[in-house]
Image (cartoon, rainbow, N blue to C red):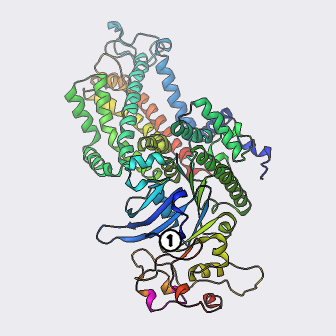
Amino acid sequence: MTMGGVVTDGEDALLRVDGLSTVIGNVRRPQTILEDVSFAVAPGEVLGVVGESGSGKSMLALTLMNLLPRPIRRTAGRIALGGTDLTGLSDRAWRDYRGRDMAMIFQEPMTSLNPVMRIGRQIMEVLVRRRGMSGRAAEQEAIRLLERVEISSPRERIRAYPHELSGGMRQRAMIAIALAANARLLIADEPTTALDVTIQAQILDLLRQLQAEMGMALILITHDLGVVAEMAHRVMVLYAGRVAELAPVEDTFYQPRHPYTRALLDSIPSVEARRERLATIEGSVPVAGAMPPGCRFAPRCPLAREACTQAPPPVMPVGDGHGVACIAPFGYELPEGVARRGAA
Amino acid sequence: MPEIPTDAIEGLAPQRARLAAFLKRLIANRSVALGGGLVLFVIALALLAPWVTPYNPLESSFRERLLPPSAAHLFGTDHFGRDVLTRVIYGGRLSLEIGFLVVLATGVFGTLIGGCAGYFRSLDNPAMRLMDAWMSFPAILLAIAVSATLGSSVTNVVIALSLATIPHTARIVRASVLVVREMEYVEAARALGARDTRILFVHVLLNSTAPLIVRLTYVFAIAILAEAVLSFIGVGPPPPAPSFGNIIANGRDFMVEAPWVTIFPGVAIFVVVLGLNLLGDGLRDVLDPRMRI
């Protein structure tokens, strides 16, 4: 499915994803994880991917890396990186892109470093194996990278084991490993969720600064809308494995067109308005295998009507670089306050 | 930007201090201290055999046959007049050598089989069913059968005992590989484009060594015990070279008149196996992170 102006113009995009679908289970009764996901990321751009637990955010990351665990598999779609369609490559050829053109950092810095290997060696491994550096040059570069991610006394720290570092420092070390790969595309899957708030801000600052300096494209997966507002240039809202809305960050927060996006924004507690209870969205995300036939959000949507239960709407352009998978903006106006139903 | 206070580095101990801390924790465990002490003592004796033994282990003396323990022969003499103390110490050499080689062979093959079975999911079922079938033979019978078929030599004893201990070891390695392969750092390594073989050997196996180390201390003990059994029934390392089992086998015809010929090597086996088992128990406690407080 092409979306014309909704996606960043195809020519300058670093990553272009078209009609990506991922399923779990056997061939006869596959259950949808991701369906018809299309987007593009330009070099130097930060794309925020938001959604509730189970919306397919992490699965999207794993699909892009070709790291889906066994019963889950990609069934359709194109993933083009710098003009090369990765989906046409063998697993082996795809592997060559990992740690070279694309790198990933994970949610849990406590467990994503090998506990029996010194930090320096884990960075140097990438430099030696993926960039063909000699041992000595790699060590110098590892020290430089640790400096770059603002770890103090890098000369000593390269000999540290992961358990000797704090959570924030481990995440910095993970970022250093990603930098060592010199990747053009960095996928960060909830990079700050496991960290406390002050460290979180430091890590985000660092990520943004490095991303801007190196012109890396960053896909930032998170469920924290505050993080998205601060970091992203564009935002993709996922709901139950489908794109709900894809928009520049200002539009996402000031002119959300999808009722789900509105409901998400409404559920952010506000400092000014004193509410008795926090706003919620009633119901829960449908699970794989029990997807509603039409729009995935229809059962929870205050605007749902007959047409919504027929077929899931595609992402349709509603503005400059702004696409929404909802018929409401085209059919009728949203009545004022209706999305605040849960606030009561 | 964050300032990390320099004193935050004090936790970053230099390597030697780190090793010292680990050794301290090891020795603080009483089983490790006692078991390790016994094992080290026996190994030292075996290594220093030519210097600490008063006689030649093979030199027979017709006039000094079956002498009871005395100042000249602390453990007495056997029916060829050979000094039992000297033979037990030299016997320890051969027994420990066999034990060590069995540990090495079992460690290598058990790790390879268990590692591959645990990591490559398609290999798991075939490899483990093979191990199950293999384990269904009683280990000692398997060792006797192999040793009897191949003929008696040190190498064949090592082969027989390794074959008997590999399947269980493979199973233990597989179990810990199954846990480690799901760790996030394995996925992180994959996300950096590491090859399967590299992930298996560098990331997975290095993180699954603790149960293997414990298992191998037991294998060591089992091998020494089993070597004695093989020798006793005559399919062990060939005489006259002494091993614990050989000495006991030689002495069994005189067990009533000269019990010292069998008792002392028996005690030696007891001491080594006790030491190894204590060491294994202690290591299990020290290496098991759940036991750490």
Residue drawn at x 23%, y 32% as measured from the top left = B146
A71 lies above or below B108: below
Secondary element at tag 1: loop
Residue drawn at x 59%, y 81% as measured from the top left = A257
B255 left or right of A230?
left
B292 lies above or below A300: above
Q: Chain of mark 1?
A: A
Where in the figure is residue A245, as x and y percent of width and height?
A: 55, 75
Kind of residue at badge 1: Gly
Q: How many marks?
A: 1
Pointer 1 residue: A54
B217 lies above or below A338: above
Q: Nearer the viewer, residue A163 or B194?
A: B194
Residue B166 sits in quarter = top left
Where in the figure is residue A285, as x and y percent of width and height?
A: 50, 78
Instruction: Judge whether residue B33 can be spotted in this image.
Output: yes
Residue drawn at x 59%, y 46% as measured from the top left = A177
Q: Nearer the viewer, residue B76 or B197?
A: B197
Q: What is the span of residues highlighted in magenta in the rendered image?
A: A300-308
Q: Nearer the viewer, residue A298 or B84?
A: A298
Where in the figure is residue A267, as x and y percent of width and height?
A: 65, 80
Disc 1 packing (10 Å; few <14; some 14–19; many ≥20):
some
Where in the figure is residue B127, as x and y percent of width and height?
A: 29, 47
Instruction: Judge whether residue B266 can be spotted in this image.
Output: no
Look at the image and tell me in which quarter the C terminus of chain A lies.
Answer: bottom right
Does A28 appear in magenta?
no
Q: Nearer the viewer, residue A157 or A100?
A: A100
Residue drawn at x 35%, y 19% as measured from the top left = B242
A327 lies above or below B257: below
Look at the image and tell me in which quarter the N terminus of chain A lies.
Answer: bottom left
A159 left or right of A7?
right
